[in-house]
Image (cartoon, rainbow, N blue to C red):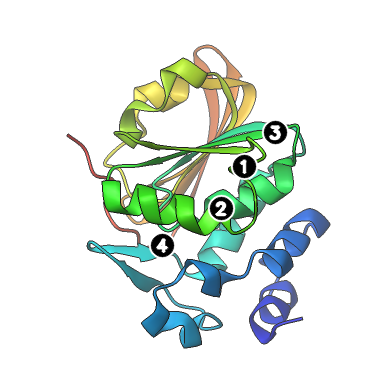
Amino acid sequence: MSKLINSLIRQGYLKSDILIEAFLNIERKEFLPKEFEDQAEANVALPIGYGQTISQPLTVAFMLELLDPRVGQKILDVGSGSGWTTALLAFVVGEKGKVIALERIKELVDLGRRNVKKFGFCEKGIVEFYEADGAEGFPSAASFDRILVSASAEEVPRALKDQLKIKGKLIIPVGNSLHYLEKKDENNFFEEKFPGFEFVPLIKD
């Protein structure tokens, strides 16, 4: 087991067996530019080009534990970047699940798809990539069991709330806080905020 994953477990950021297994099988270095591969074990955000970053492993672990993805679920991954979170989620949901990855930058859509293909998730029909405005969600595939957003919004987009299933969970950075939302019914959400995070902004048209 890598020092990084060991550290995340020891500090309590990685807890669930399925996510620990995902982190062990989906290595971060596969989603980094060549010049940063030797920093894959560093617990920091790293550039992936086009002004975007791959998130700090601690942050990804924290977000995914909050999201609580399960086998067979349909998950929307907004701001998929180089594809790391998409592949981690695909590992969890398995062949009966689906992950829709949205990215605003075409070059990153292509990069993310290439990286995720290394693990066979696209060929098995588990993952689909689209160039799209993540703030609008993906109505044609709604509704979703889980929605993960990896870029900071000014507020929680209404479209994402609408596309979440009842009892579904949404994780999104708003400003410098992570917001956890759980849909109680069509109009009501439980919401909890976790301050102290930094993300690139959610790109909108």
**Which secondary structure, mark 3?**
loop
Q: Which kind of residue does numbered mark 3 sit on?
A: Gly
Q: Specify whether 183 is left or right of 195.
A: right
Mark 2 or mark 4: which is in front? 2
Residue 141 appears left or right of 123: left
Of badges 4 and 1, nearer the viewer stands 1
Q: CA distance from mark 4 to mark 1?
A: 34 Å
Question: Can I make out residue 194 in this image?
Answer: no
The answer to which of marks 2 and 3 sits earlier in the sequence is 3
Is 113 in front, or is 42? 113
Identify the disc placed on residue 117: 2
Q: Secondary structure at mark 2?
A: helix
* Residue in view at x 68 percent, y 42 percent: 69
Residue placed under numbered mark 3 in the picture:
97
Q: Is residue 55 visible?
A: yes
Separation (CA) of disc 4 from disc 3 = 29 Å
* Residue found 62% across the figure and 42% down from its top: 123
Q: Give the image quarter of residue 197.
A: bottom left
- Circles 2 and 1, Cβ within 8 Å, touching? The answer is yes
Whole-percent x, y for residue 96 in the image: 75, 32
Which image quadrant is residue 47 in? bottom left
